Image (spheres, rainbow, N blue to C red):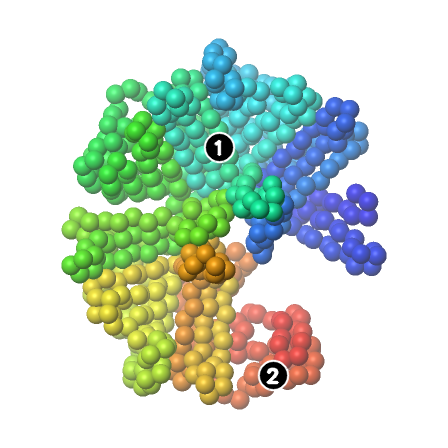
């Protein structure tokens, strides 16, 4: 297009952007593995003769709040084609093979009828005006999108089909397809086909219809890419309008008398739940017809949900919720708060929200794969008798800048428990197994001493007041958090332990644990334990201590979920205060004479670096003792870093930085700008 080029190869998408006068050229390569979905748009009538392709990626990028721009500029890539020059369905076939796996059956070989659903039309003016969807014959849709419109792969089957006023929604054995027919009353030639594979969907919800005014039920799908757009305000005097989630969130209205939402819920459960904790149901294994049959009346799900009495017996919950659960899915914990319910099953977190007068109910299912971390809080003293659970997810959501609210309402889910009713450490063990992998050793079988670090205390009033952490005996911490406090899994080992004035930081073979002892001087009974698995941490930094005034060094950890909170301003005349990152960012101060920050750097390198580009060091492979030994003096790392002269020789940089690099890690390029270095 003009001076720029867009190339799709067997391995990647390559975009060549010629900038300025043409001497500056950017070559952007995006691997097919980063592709999360795509859309094609056919050519329209006389005015709009171009077809279009839109690709959606899950690439991280610096966030933008500028009006009229996307929040993440790397999520969406759009390309316009001359319709006479490009076969848009050939492009669709090529990308489908990359995103969904190769087609194993030629389209002409496709066959096999599915049980049909007679389409009797909308039957309601209000439903037609509201664009409510109804169930239609999946077999007819299957034939249409294989032969009339060559959209689907030959080995792909339409399992459910819905139709609104003009648009359609397809659930196939490989993906979700949204068909948007554009133009006046859908009579235009321009049609958009959005394709999202099942693995891209990380959460879903269904809502029942409400009172006689609310005649439609809804389905919501959340994707794992950030396609949020910041619209422009109508005028300068207006407040900024709320962001638009675009294609990272799909909401569909159903006619309540034409679509059984519990059948939709059961179908999505079958397609989205990881059968063995990792893999989706294969496309070659169709969803059984018994799953998409109407849910039998008289199951009393709503009666149970609407009961204000506590119903925490998991066996009763399992029996009541059985019509919405998979055959191999079982309730582990069930909690109630008023009319709402919170259920943890073997496959998901299920939150049931009874709205309005009680007839409208939302069933939100979040897969365990979307969980990025969690925290438990024990009960306090007389006033605060509740224990608490907080779950952190990486679900996309429209961003909020409202003061006193989180930036992303889907990141954090908090639940308060009656301390006399719930064993919070039993909840911890269950979630740990889901987040970290199953425990392979009973806690009572744990043994084996680790080399200890004698804790001589803070030794400094300033360090104590500043809550600076010191290195303590990892073996003692290991024993404490296996036996005195049953927090860790039996197969999990504390490798490094730090202690501040009252709080602790643990690096285990499976996770980072932050122990926050609350109350005056830490003498309260309330303690928060934040657990974050190593795979959730995407970046880290260590800072050495400064001059004689700055006596502490620091460590920073960045997580891959958005737990940012927008605080309220003190008064209307004050500017908005900066957002607070909460649990998506951890910063710890160390006593510089009690903690070797280069040892911490080396340990984090071993735990966080993907050895083969994908997998972390397994928990069963401890970090070698040589890595967490103090870095030898005389390496002159700081001398080399502090040199103002350019020193870009990678061999010299490799030799100088060797104490901070892994054994199989080598410097490829080294650059210096003044006192700073980039390697």
The residue to which callout 2 is attached is 642
At x 38% / y 61%, what residue is drawn?
511
Q: Out of 285 and 99, give the one closest to the viewer.
A: 99
Helix, strand or loop at disc 1?
strand
Query: What is the x, y in percent for residue 94?
Result: 67, 36
- In this image, 368 relative to 485: left or right? right
**Vertical comparison of 538 with 115: above or below:** below
Looking at the image, is mark 2 or mark 1 earlier in the sequence?
Answer: 1
At x 26% / y 24%, what residue is drawn?
299
At x 56% / y 86%, what residue is drawn?
636
Quarter placement of the N terminus: top right
Whether residue 608 is visible here, answered yes or no, is: yes
Q: Residues within 10 Å of mark 1 (few under 14, many from 20)?
A: some
Determine whether label 2 and label 1 are within 8 Å by CB: no
**Quadrant in the picture for residue 641:** bottom right
Q: CA distance from mark 2 to mark 1?
A: 55 Å
The residue to which callout 1 is attached is 251
Quarter placement of the C terminus: bottom right
Query: What is the x, y in percent for residue 597?
Result: 45, 77
Whether residue 536 is visible here, answered yes or no, is: no
Query: What is the x, y in percent for residue 44?
Result: 72, 26
**Quadrant in the picture for residue 510:** bottom left
At x 55% / y 23%, what residue is drawn?
168
């Amino acid at each position: 297009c003009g001076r720029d080029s867009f190339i799709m190869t067997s391995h990647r998408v390559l975009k060549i952007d010629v900038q300025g006068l043409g001497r500056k050229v950017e070559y952007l390569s995006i691997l097919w593995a980063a592709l999360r979905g795509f859309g094609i748009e056919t050519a329209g009538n006389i005015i709009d003769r171009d077809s279009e392709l839109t690709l959606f990626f899950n690439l991280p990028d610096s966030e933008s709040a500028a009006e009229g721009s996307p929040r993440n500029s790397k999520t969406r890539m759009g390309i316009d084609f001359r319709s006479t020059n490009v076969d848009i369905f050939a492009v669709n076939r090529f990308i489908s093979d990359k995103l969904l796996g190769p087609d194993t059956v030629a389209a002409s070989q496709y066959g096999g009828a599915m049980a049909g659903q007679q389409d009797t039309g909308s039957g309601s003016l209000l439903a037609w005006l509201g664009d409510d969807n109804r169930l239609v014959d999946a077999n007819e849709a299957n034939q249409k999108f294989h032969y009339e419109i060559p959209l689907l792969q030959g080995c792909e089957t339409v399992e459910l089909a819905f139709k609104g006023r003009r648009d359609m929604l397809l659930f196939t054995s490989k993906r979700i397809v949204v068909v948007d027919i554009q133009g006046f009353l859908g009579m235009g030639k321009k049609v958009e086909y959005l394709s999202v594979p099942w693995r891209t969907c990380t959460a879903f919800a269904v809502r029942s219809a409400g009172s006689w005014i609310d005649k439609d039920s809804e389905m919501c799908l959340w994707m794992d890419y950030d396609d949020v757009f910041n619209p422009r305000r109508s005028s300068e005097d207006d407040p900024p309008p709320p962001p638009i989630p675009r294609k990272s969130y799909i909401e569909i209205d159903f006619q309540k008398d034409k679509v059984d939402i519990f059948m939709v819920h059961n179908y999505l459960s079958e397609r989205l739940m990881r059968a063995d904790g990792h893999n989706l149901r294969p496309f070659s294994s169709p969803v059984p017809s018994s799953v998409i049959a109407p849910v039998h009346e008289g199951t009393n799900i709503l009666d149970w949900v609407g009961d204000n009495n506590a119903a925490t017996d998991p066996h009763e919950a399992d029996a009541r919720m059985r019509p919405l659960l998979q055959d191999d899915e079982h309730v582990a914990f069930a909690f109630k708060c008023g009319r709402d319910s919170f259920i943890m099953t073997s496959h998901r977190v299920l939150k049931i929200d009874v709205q309005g007068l009680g007839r409208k109910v939302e069933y939100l299912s979040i897969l365990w794969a979307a969980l990025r971390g969690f925290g438990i809080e024990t009960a306090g003293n007389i006033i605060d008798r509740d224990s608490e659970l907080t779950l952190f997810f990486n679900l996309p959501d429209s961003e909020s800048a409202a003061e006193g609210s989180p930036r992303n309402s889907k990141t954090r889910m908090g639940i308060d428990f009656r301390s006399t009713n719930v064993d919070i450490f039993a909840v911890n063990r269950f979630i740990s197994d889901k987040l970290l992998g199953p425990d392979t050793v009973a806690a009572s079988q744990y043994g084996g001493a680790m080399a200890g670090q004698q804790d001589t205390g803070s030794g400094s009033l300033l360090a104590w007041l500043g809550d600076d952490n010191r290195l303590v005996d990892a073996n003692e911490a290991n024993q404490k958090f296996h036996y005195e406090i049953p927090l860790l899994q039996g197969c999990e080992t504390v490798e490094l332990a730090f202690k501040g004035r009252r709080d602790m930081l643990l690096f285990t073979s499976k996770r980072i644990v932050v122990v926050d002892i609350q109350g005056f001087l830490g003498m309260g009974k309330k303690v928060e334990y934040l657990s974050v698995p190593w795979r959730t941490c995407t970046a880290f930094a260590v800072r050495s201590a400064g001059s004689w005034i700055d006596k502490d060094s620091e460590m920073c950890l960045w997580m891959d979920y958005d737990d940012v909170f927008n605080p309220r301003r003190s008064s209307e005349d004050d500017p908005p205060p900066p957002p607070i990152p909460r649990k998506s960012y951890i910063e710890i101060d160390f006593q510089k004479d009690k903690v070797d920050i280069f040892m911490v750097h080396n340990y984090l390198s071993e735990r966080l670096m993907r050895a083969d580009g994908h997998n972390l060091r397994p928990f069963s492979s401890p970090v070698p003792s040589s890595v967490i030994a103090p870095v030898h003096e005389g390496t002159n790392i700081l001398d080399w870093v502090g040199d103002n002269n350019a020193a870009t020789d990678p061999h010299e940089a490799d030799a100088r930085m060797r104490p901070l690099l892994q054994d199989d890690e080598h410097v490829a390029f080294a650059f210096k700008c003044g006192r700073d270095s980039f390697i």
